[in-house]
Amino acid sequence: MHLLVQSIIVGVLTGGVYALMATGQTLIFGVMRVINVAQGAMVILAAYLSSSLFSSFGIDPFLSILITAPILFVLGFTIHATFLRRLRPEQNELSLLIMFAVALGIEGVLGLAYSTTYRSIQTGYVNRSFTVAGYHVALVRLLAFGLSAVILVGLFLLLNRSRFGRSVRATVQNPTSARLLGVEPTRVAAIGFGLGAATAAAAGAVYGLVYPFNGGSHYDLISRLLSIVMLGGLGSLGGSVIAALVMGVAESVVAANVSPIWSSFTFFAVLLAVLVFRPRGLFGVAQRGAL
Amino acid sequence: MTVVRRAGLALLLTAAVLVGFVGVTHWIMNIFIFTVMYAGLATGWNLVGGFAGYTSLGHAAFFGIGAYAMDVTFEHHSIGAGYVPFAILPFIGIGVAALSIPLGWIAMRTRAATFAIVTITLLFVVQTLAFNLKSITHGSQGMGITPPPFALHTYERPFYVAMLAMLVLALLITWYVQRSKLGLALAAIRDDEDKAHGVGVHVTAVKLIAFSTSVAIASMIGAVWAYYVLFIYPQFAVDPLISIGIVLMVFLGGKGTLWGPALGALIVVPAQQYFAYELGASKLYLIAYAGLFLVIMLFLPQGIIPSLASWADRNRHRRARTLSGGQLVSPPLHELLP
């Protein structure tokens, strides 16, 4: 019982980080109908940037997000402007393949710049933890969860309370009508893409603190993130957050109570169940030809 | 098929077989084998990716299953004079086809980009299984097969012929599908699956036939590959780069055409091997590959053969208009359709 509760605590905290990554991906899917398979690669890129900033300049990984987020925003914006702008929404397989190539390119650049040995960000507090009612809570994971929560709330406010958010939602719902009302879908999509990439910056700093990584780690993330967004329903922000928490907990419970080597399988098992019983995900909207 | 065409094909096949018998260095022969291997994989992928329009990124999973099936079978059995492993290829193909039916049934409940996601995930599932099922696959240690006792200077020949046989099989199946009702049904599914269903196409059955045939070819090629490289391990046998390479070649040559995928392989694989040779298996190679991919996706998403065909059509059309003195000649079909 103690083990179970402990693993649920770890799972929820991990789920928060997954939620951050998956939200960026969902945002990008929402504005562009692009399945960003490079989201994992962007997270790893950001992890490397934070790690370099820490080892070279002593900048705390949490603070380094203020530097890496704008870099990733520009990267996302540029990828959109260079490769995706001219694609039509129905070409979403082509955009998926393009993003796959981008992911390979990022992996290649990272391998060249940093070699392929695993590294992790070792700050002074990285191994600190405290005990609440007999349960261990790692400080880093708690901070990561808190950061994710803050960013998610910020994104939610941005999308629901600001003019930009309204244009995003309008573009998601009906690009043609949005254009008639004076919204520029291309610009909205470019900024949305940039924002999605910027969330990867935050996720990357946190990922680097919690897990060791190398250039190839993005493959681990791709399948996990894709399973999460499928479970939540493609394009549903709330869905992806809930799905991330569910997956985080499921993974951690299996890792602690069954075996760590099978923990990544929980993602696939859940994905399988989703595909069989509810292909559009928990909160997805059924669209003709979309699934 | 005209006599000229038939003669041309016979000539091409003879040339392709003879290539395996000219005395070239092992390194060149290695390039030939990989070119024909990818040509076969791409032609097989085209059945489901090109004709049905279902972009699978999971073919490397079945390639890997075939590879492991080969090594697991011959871990405890003798390979005899070295030709026994080739004889079990059909059984691997049939086995994997059977296995792929439930998997395909689940995956093909989704469409377009979602299908691509599900098939990538399938690839990672198989890779994780290869890592974790240590009693069968020996996990990350990898597993090997006894080297065959072939004469050194013609060592590659049997592998080349086997790969070529797989390519010819894939081309024959494609040729048959193109001319049959199955091909029409697949085209209908690619254009509008719901309508196809509405007019009475058995969409699920048709999709599953295409998928299982396609991945069975991939698995048999994987089996030959495992025998050729002698030693496999999870990241090597179930490699996302194989899937993405196949897709790249098909897009370059032309989706949904008979010769396009093989043509794409003929262009990409030697370039790929050259990059790998010049740049080493380093990360520069990965960057060059990604760059090539982006260029093709952005500038030639239609592929070489369809682009050439529409160019030739336009020319013929223009000439026809001049010949008929400006009178209306019916334009080619693809210009009438949106």
Image (cartoon, rainbow, N blue to C red):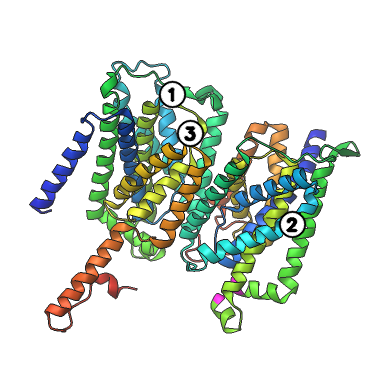
Q: Horizontally, is A262 left or right of A63 in the view?
A: left
Q: Over which residues does the magenta segment extend?
A: A171-175
Q: Contact (CB < 8 A) between labels 3 and 1?
A: no
* Residue B306 numbered mark, or none: none
Is residue B196 shown in magenta? Answer: no
Circle 3 or circle 1, nearest the eye: 3
- Report if the CB atoms under discs 1 and 2 are less than 8 Å apart: no
Q: Amino acid at mark 2?
A: Ile
Dot 1: what SS? helix
Which residue in the structure is indicated by mark 2? A67
Disc 1 marks which residue?
A: B72
> How far apart are labels 2 and 3 at the CA level?
37 Å
* Residue positioned 53% across, 53% down in the render: A102
Of the residues tagged 2 and 3, which is closer to the observer?
Answer: 2
Where residue A37 appears, as percent x and y from the top left, is 56, 53
Q: Please rate how many residues cluster around mark 1, counting C-alpha atoms within 10 Å: few if below 14, some from 14 to 19, many from 20.
A: some
